């Protein structure tokens, strides 16, 4: 068992101090009161939040016992990147190889690719060890899983059969290199090979996205019924579900909303049945009546069929980025879905020999990169104002933090999956609406919320 005390890391200590200060500020506890609450000798809390004394597990446990906060609210993230990236080399990936049996026979070979504590990616390289002679979903050799929570973007290499089951309907989709699939949570699936003599594997890029972390923990407390009741269901009328939810939240009757929105009460009643839809002018009136933004009344939909969205390479959209004549990348679009507007899956071919301006990219997303083919492929990135470079080889994989400037050069082919972290659009709007200096204090609050000397 690893015996490293993760709390001893200086960067973790700095974030622990800031979280403790921020929590005490939220609870309106000046230092002396915090000392009393936590049973500490006078002056200790001030030293803990100043970093003069290390924050220990005992302090955290005492705080979570005395205050209405969870232990996890006091725990910071551990940054496991080196200069903002993590690179897992092909040899390390191969060393993680595990054969997983199904029904007593080897079915898959799994290899880890890069993961970071900062991103919800759980990407595996998986080789199919079961070969089939047909494309029947009911072939008895096919071993199905039970489905899993994580979303899955699957990228196919070789003659792979993809099997998926949705509410009892089973399908088999024969796939080739470059084909990809986006899959929704908990749909059972499986993979086999159609040819024992050809390499057949997938990159199974699973990720939690908005489902893991706080929402799952909150619903674990609220319970199954709440999870059922809170689900906006596409088999119902999504807009009516959204509107009803706001009426409950804001304690409004349909007649009161109609009056505020300048609409006929019968019209609001009709909209609540879901059988009619609201044109843009009515949406704006309803939004004003509810004191929300129009976007809050817009349902989110999925383009998946039976839980999946398939993108065959043969009919994928392709384009180039950068100036004409000096294109930086050739991009091929992989499977995706409007349910995840902040997810981007693409196959990228670098085109430039040097990281000129056109090659540099930056995004708010967490990035995962798998090197499918390398040919003088290099990655340049900026960390703390300094440029770094790494040579890339087939089978290497990379995690990049959000906002890290990066450029890929040389030739080769990269599988890139970008996903949103916890800093989603709502949070970005909130950050932008803070008082001056707010963003800095949000990241590291080290001071009492008022001055002891008075002002
Ligand atoms: Fe899976």
Image (cartoon, rainbow, N blue to C red):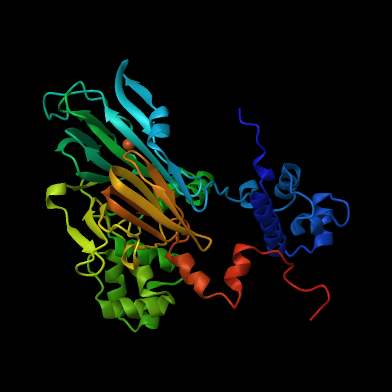
Residue 123 falls in which quadrant of the image? top left
User: Residue 351, how many percent across, how many down?
Assistant: 25, 57
Where, quadrant-wise, is the C terminus in this rendering?
A: bottom right
Residue 130 falls in which quadrant of the image? top left
Image vertical order of residue 139 relative to residue 434, above or below: above
Q: Is residue 141 visible?
A: yes
User: Residue 144, how many percent across, how many down?
Assistant: 27, 28
Residue 294 falls in which quadrant of the image? bottom left
User: Viewer-proximal residue, 455 or 155?
Assistant: 155
Q: Residue furthest top?
A: 104
User: Residue 149, how many percent across, how many down?
Assistant: 39, 41
User: Viewer-proximal residue, 393 or 20?
Assistant: 393
Left or right: residue 449 versus residue 215 is right
Left or right: residue 104 versus residue 89 is left
Q: How many marks?
A: 0
User: Viewer-proximal residue, 290 or 349?
Assistant: 349
User: Residue 40, how many percent across, how many down?
Assistant: 84, 50
Image vertical order of residue 40 relative to residue 204, above or below: below
Residue pictured at 38% horizontal, 30% vertical:
94
Q: Residue furthest right?
A: 42
User: Viewer-proximal residue, 214 or 43?
Assistant: 43
Residue pictured at 19% horizontal, 67% vertical:
325
Q: Is residue 148 visible?
A: no
């Amino acid at each position: 068992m690893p015996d490293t005390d993760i709390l001893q890391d200086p960067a973790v200590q700095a974030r622990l101090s800031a979280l403790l200060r921020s929590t005490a500020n939220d609870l309106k506890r000046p230092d002396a009161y915090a000392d009393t609450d936590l049973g500490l000798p006078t002056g200790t809390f001030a030293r803990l939040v100043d970093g003069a004394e290390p924050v220990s597990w005992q302090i955290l446990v005492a705080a979570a016992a005395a205050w209405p906060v969870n232990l996890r609210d006091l725990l910071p993230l551990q940054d496991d990147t080196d200069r903002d990236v993590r690179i897992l080399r092909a040899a390390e990936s191969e060393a993680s190889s595990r054969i997983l049996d199904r029904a007593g026979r080897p079915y898959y070979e799994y290899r880890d690719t890069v993961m970071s504590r900062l991103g919800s990616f759980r990407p595996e390289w998986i080789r199919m060890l079961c070969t089939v002679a047909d494309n029947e979903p009911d072939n008895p050799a096919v071993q199905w899983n039970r489905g899993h929570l994580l979303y899955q973007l699957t990228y196919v290499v070789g003659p792979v059969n993809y099997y998926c089951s949705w509410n009892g309907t089973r399908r088999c989709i024969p796939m080739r290199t470059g084909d990809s699939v986006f899959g929704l949570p908990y749909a059972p699936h499986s993979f086999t090979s159609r040819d024992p003599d050809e390499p057949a594997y997938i990159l199974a890029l699973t990720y939690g996205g908005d489902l893991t972390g706080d929402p799952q923990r909150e619903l674990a407390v609220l319970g199954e019924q709440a999870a059922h009741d809170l689900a906006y269901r596409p088999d119902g009328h999504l807009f009516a579900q959204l509107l009803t939810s706001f009426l409950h939240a804001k304690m409004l009757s349909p007649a009161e909303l109609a009056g505020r929105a300048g609409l006929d009460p019968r019209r609001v009643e009709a909209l609540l049945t879901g059988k009619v839809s609201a044109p843009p002018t009515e949406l704006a009136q309803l939004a004003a009546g509810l004191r929300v933004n129009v976007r809050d009344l817009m349902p989110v939909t999925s383009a998946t069929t039976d839980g999946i969205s398939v993108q065959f390479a043969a009919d994928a959209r392709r384009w180039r980025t950068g100036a004409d004549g000096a294109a930086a990348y050739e991009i091929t679009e992989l499977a995706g879905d409007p349910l995840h507007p902040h997810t981007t899956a693409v196959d990228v071919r670098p085109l430039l020999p040097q990281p000129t301006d056109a090659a540099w990219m930056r995004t708010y997303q967490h990035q995962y990169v798998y090197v499918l083919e390398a040919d003088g492929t290099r990655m340049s990135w900026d960390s703390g104002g300094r440029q770094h470079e790494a040579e890339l080889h087939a089978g290497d994989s990379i995690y990049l933090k959000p906002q890290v400037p990066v450029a890929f050069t040389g030739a080769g082919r990269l599988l890139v999956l970008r996903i949103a972290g916890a800093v989603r659009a709502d949070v970005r709007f909130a950050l932008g609406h803070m008082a001056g200096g707010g963003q800095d204090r949000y990241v590291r609050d080290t001071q009492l919320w008022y001055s002891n000397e008075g002002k």
